[in-house]
Amino acid sequence: MSDAAVRITGMTQRRPNFELGPIDLVIPSGYVTAIVGPNGSGKSSLFRLLLDLAKPNSGGMELLGEPVGSSNDTKLKARIGYMPEQPVDLEDGLRGNQKTDFVRQWYPKWDVHLYQELLRRFEVDPAIKLGKMSKGMRRKFDLSLMMAHHPDLLLLDEPSSGLDPIAWKTMIDVLHRYMEQGNRTIVMASHIVDEVRRLADYIVFVVQGKVLGFYEKDTLLNSWQVMYIEAAGVGINWKQMPGYRHAASISGGTTYKVVTEDALQAERWLAEQKLALISKQKLELDEILLHHIEHARGVL
Ligand SMILES: Nc1ncnc2c1ncn2[C@@H]1O[C@H](COP(=O)(O)OP(=O)(O)OP(=O)(O)O)[C@@H](O)[C@H]1O
């Protein structure tokens, strides 16, 4: 794995009704990492902490090798593009162009040609007041603005929220192209299975303020499977099957539906037990997340 784009060490944030962490997490540079978790699990809170918009109670964070929270972070921030989940209400009265004129001053690598190309691709008129733009249009404007200074790291909090299918496809293409150039990194929170499938190299599950795991996407999607197994006349202790997560007999018969998170070893085990594997199917990302949530509810 390459250098760390994000390094979080023993970080906690306590609120009256919610505790985030402790989180220890290293996100590699040069890849797309998706943070996946249910509503209220702490994804947006994590982004705000990484941007120093909120302070942790303990622990530390680094972005692109620099500590978060130092007083002189202008150079670091110039290397980052951040897209919050919600637009900033205070900017409602500004026209798009007025926001751009203010924002671009902070970025030495500001690229007006890229900015204009992105606005054209997303079909956004920057002369409109931000408060008068539709939700999706404002999102597309913010995406264009945020990418026009050639950031090394993009932090995207549910980037496709409000986008129509055409704009969504454009966004996926724009982000793919962004990743083609140099050692760039995207960290994004997303609920959209297809988006994670198309963009992510790595997946982080966050549930109830805790990181449940960091996975290489293809390994994760290949290793979680539901298997249909014929097991007539034998009492099987399914819990001995590698990666066992769940088992149920189908309509009380001798066929079992078993979920494993270690498909390769599970198949070997079935062969050793001389059990017939009738069919197998990969789980979708949201089904895998559901298993993680249920497991977390039992142990956290
Ligand atoms: N400013 C705040 N003050 C107090 N509590 C907050 C604040 N913002 C969020 N929370 C609480 O922190 C927890 C985590 O919220 P957060 O927005 O980080 O979750 P999320 O995973 O981004 O959720 P979603 O998928 O709905 O966007 C929730 O319990 C939420 O109510």
Image: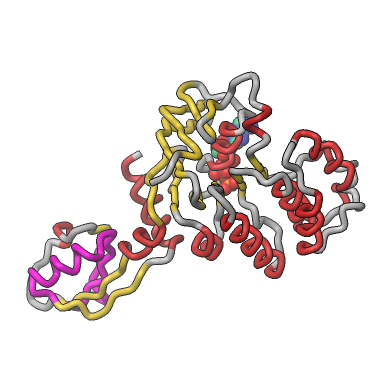
Q: Quadrant of residue 25?
A: top left
Magenta span contains residue 254: yes
Task: Give residue 132's position: percent from left, percent from top.
Answer: 88, 52
Residue in the picture at 71% in, 46% down: 146
Task: Give residue 45's position: percent from left, percent from top.
Answer: 57, 36
- The residue closer to the viewer here, 192 or 105, is 105
| Ligand 1 visible in quadrant | top right
Task: Give residue 210's position: percent from left, percent from top.
Answer: 42, 38
Residue, far top: 71
Residue, far bottom: 278
Which residues are the magenta region? 246-275
- Position of residue 176 relative to residue 46, above or below, is below
292 relative to 18 in the view: left or right:
left
Task: Give residue 273's position: percent from left, percent from top.
Answer: 8, 69
Residue in the picture at 11% in, 66% down: 236
131 relative to 139 in the view: left or right:
right
Residue in the picture at 49% in, 63% down: 197
48 relative to 218 in the view: left or right:
right
Question: From the image, which quarter does the C terminus lie in?
Answer: top left
8 relative to 103 in the view: left or right:
left
Residue in the picture at 51% in, 26% down: 14
- Position of residue 149 relative to residue 65, above or below, is below
Magenta span contains residue 232: no
- The residue closer to the viewer here, 166 or 118, is 118
